[in-house]
Image (tube, helix red, strand yellow):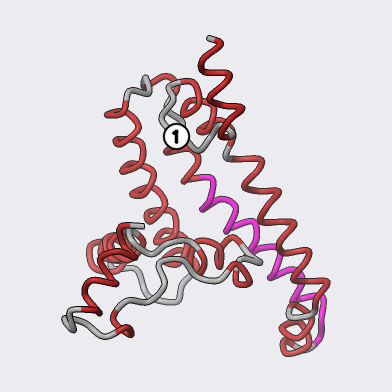
Amino acid sequence: MLYNAVSIIAVATLLNSPADWPPYFGTVADATTLRDFWGKYWHSGLRNPMVANANFVTYDLLRLSRGTLAARYLSIFLTFAISGAIHHLVDSIAGVPAAENTTADLFLMQAVGITVEDFTVWLFERRFAKVQDAAAARKHGWARVLGYVWVCAWLVWVTPPMSYSHIRYELDRFARPGPVGALIAKLR
């Protein structure tokens, strides 16, 4: 919401053009893979600096060659590790005890999920003789539906441990349903 407010002010005062303020979130239509969920759909507020730092370590410090599997996946894991560390720190400051703070695990599991997903796509493409056939098959409606199911299933599987600590320490006011959550809080 802050992003939208600042963008409206910046455009209204002619400091920026609308093109300088792309939507903070992408379209949910792009969220058919974990890679696209995090890379195209989810907000980009922290993504670019984290990717830049991960790439610095991968390509400049470690001097891995671009395009190699090692470089690709190290960069992905580092990006999510940095994100997990930042979110872990925020949760710690907000009062989640270290023993219950599973935020870093949640973010590292996203890198694991992307790795599993990439391997599955690789196997799928090997199954088809022509890569363009595989790419075309992935664009069909059934593949998109399967992709949404995969992304939802993965997120439902890995997110609850972090959410439990947020609910327990009341860090996320949106974690509980509105009137029902308020009633439960009053009954405690």
- Residue 115 forms part of the magenta stretch: yes
Front-most of residues 72 and 82 = 82
**Residue visible at 39% across and 61% down in the picture:** 75
The x and y percentages for residue 87 are: 35, 41
* Callout 1 crowding tier (Cα within 10 Å): few <14, some 14–19, many ≥20: few
Check the image and report above or below for 181 versus 11. above
Q: Secondary structure at mark 1?
A: loop
- Residue 128 forms part of the magenta stretch: yes
Is residue 87 found left or right of 27 in the rendered image?
A: left
What range of the chain is rendered magenta? 109-129
**Residue visible at 39% across and 43% down in the picture:** 84
Is residue 33 found left or right of 23 in the rendered image?
A: right
Judged by its main secondary structure, the magenta piece is: helix
**Residue visible at 82% across and 75% down in the picture:** 127
The x and y percentages for residue 164 are: 54, 27
Q: Amino acid at mark 1?
A: Asp
Q: Which residue is identified by label 1?
A: 172
Q: Quadrant of the N terminus?
A: bottom left
Check the image and report above or below for 72 versus 175. below
Is residue 94 found left or right of 141 in the rendered image?
A: left
The x and y percentages for residue 176 are: 56, 31
Determine the image quadrant of residue 59: bottom left
**Residue visible at 42% across and 58% down in the picture:** 74
Check the image and report above or below for 44 versus 108. below
Determine the image quadrant of residue 89: top left
The x and y percentages for residue 62 are: 28, 62
